[in-house]
């Protein structure tokens, strides 16, 4: 079995964007309203995902709203709540229509300057009403503007960690949009925050206080596998516990698109801490002119790691996902 833990609903009906446009134009008098998207429209929009899953031998997607569309930097707390609810309801409907192929992962109604306590009600709703199995967490709620978001190692986040441990749901630390015009969203902003998340969490007491917390860093951990000795040196210099020890509390998805980088990730983190991901459909959906295959066609890359045992390959493809997404029916 192959489980892809990083997939976004990037093919959703244009009616979702139309809803957001109405939100933006009426932000001073927010109303929830409805999307008006039928089950047939949902099914039609998923044709590409289902075909690609079949072609590549992927059995299940952990399916979440568009990361760049979470839009936490815009609007009031109420606007963020309504936007998160309609997106999560849409993901829930997808997974009810195709329960064998998709498992629901939600976005949180995060708002700049507002405690993560405001997300707990939506987490409960999604888990208990829709059967959600995980959530995406934006570490940069304001998109780089003020008020700045506290470090992931700060106790500011503790109400969220406590709820996730209580419900036994994992979180993927995934940034959303940025207001910084000097940063490409997919090429710089996302992977910058992947790196920062690891640094902040490994320099904190989070895993002392929440030893059962399950957090996944996407995109192969950003620069972490390549700057390994830099962080090892910093931990030694600052008399912290070894970086190599602290990083083992985290999990990393394998949304990387070349053999060398993928193998370095597995060597650094170990097969117990890596989960298969292709980020369907996202940054790497383009065709590689040197191979004629899409960059995100990465199942063969995992199979080509000749020094992996069959048992360790199975962990990356599905075993680790089964362990972390304990609420999923896999």
Image (cartoon, rainbow, N blue to C red):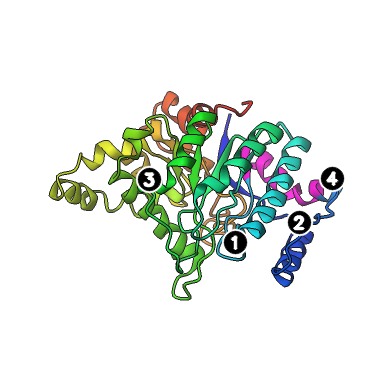
Q: Which of marks 2 and 1 is in front?
A: 2
Q: Is mark 2 on a helix, strand or loop?
A: loop
User: Can the viewer see residue 15?
Assistant: yes
Distance from disc 2 to disc 3, alpha carbons, whole Å, reads: 32 Å
Most foreground residue, 235 or 63 = 235
- Dominant secondary-structure state across the stretch colored magenta: helix
* Disc 4 to disc 1: CB gap under 8 Å: no
Q: Mark number for residue 39?
A: 4
Q: Name the residue under label 1.
A: 71
Q: Is mark 3 on a helix, strand or loop?
A: helix
Q: Mark number for residue 32?
A: 2
Q: Which of marks 4 and 2 is in front?
A: 2
Residue at image point 61% right, 41% down: 121
x, y percentage for residue 299?
53, 41
Query: N-terminal of the two: label 3 or label 4?
Result: 4
Residue at image point 46% right, 72% down: 180
Query: N-terminal of the two: label 1 or label 3?
Result: 1
């Amino acid at each position: 079995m192959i489980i892809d833990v990083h997939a976004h609903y990037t093919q959703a009906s244009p009616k979702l964007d139309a809803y957001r446009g109405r939100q933006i134009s009426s932000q001073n008098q927010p109303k929830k309203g409805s999307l008006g998207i039928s089950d047939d429209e949902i099914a039609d929009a998923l044709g590409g995902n289902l075909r690609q899953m079949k072609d590549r031998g992927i059995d299940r997607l952990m399916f979440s709203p568009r990361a760049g569309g979470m839009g936490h930097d815009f609007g009031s707390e109420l606007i963020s709540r309504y936007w998160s609810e309609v997106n999560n309801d849409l993901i829930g409907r997808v997974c009810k229509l195709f329960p064998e192929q998709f498992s629901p992962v939600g976005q949180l109604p995060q708002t700049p300057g507002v405690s993560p306590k405001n997300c707990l009600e939506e987490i409960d709703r999604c888990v208990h009403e829709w059967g959600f199995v995980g959530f995406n967490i934006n570490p940069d709620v304001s998109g780089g503007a003020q008020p700045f978001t506290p470090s992931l190692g700060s106790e500011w986040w503790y109400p969220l960690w406590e709820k996730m441990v209580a419900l036994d749901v994992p979180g993927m630390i995934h940034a959303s949009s940025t207001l910084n015009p000097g940063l490409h969203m997919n090429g710089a902003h996302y992977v910058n925050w992947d790196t920062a998340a690891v640094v902040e969490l490994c320099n904190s007491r989070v895993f002392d206080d929440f030893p059962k917390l399950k957090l996944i860093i996407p995109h192969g951990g950003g620069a972490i596998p390549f700057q390994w000795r830099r962080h090892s040196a910093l931990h030694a210099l600052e008399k912290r516990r070894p970086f190599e020890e602290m990083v083992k509390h985290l999990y990393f998805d394998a949304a990387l698109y070349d053999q060398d980088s993928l193998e370095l990730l597995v060597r650094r983190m170990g097969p117990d801490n890596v989960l298969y991901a292709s980020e369907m459909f996202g940054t790497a959906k383009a065709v590689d002119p040197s191979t004629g295959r899409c960059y995100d066609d990465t199942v063969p890359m995992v199979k080509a790691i000749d020094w992996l045992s069959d048992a360790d390959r199975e962990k990356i493809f599905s075993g680790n996902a089964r362990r972390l997404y304990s609420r999923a029916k896999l």
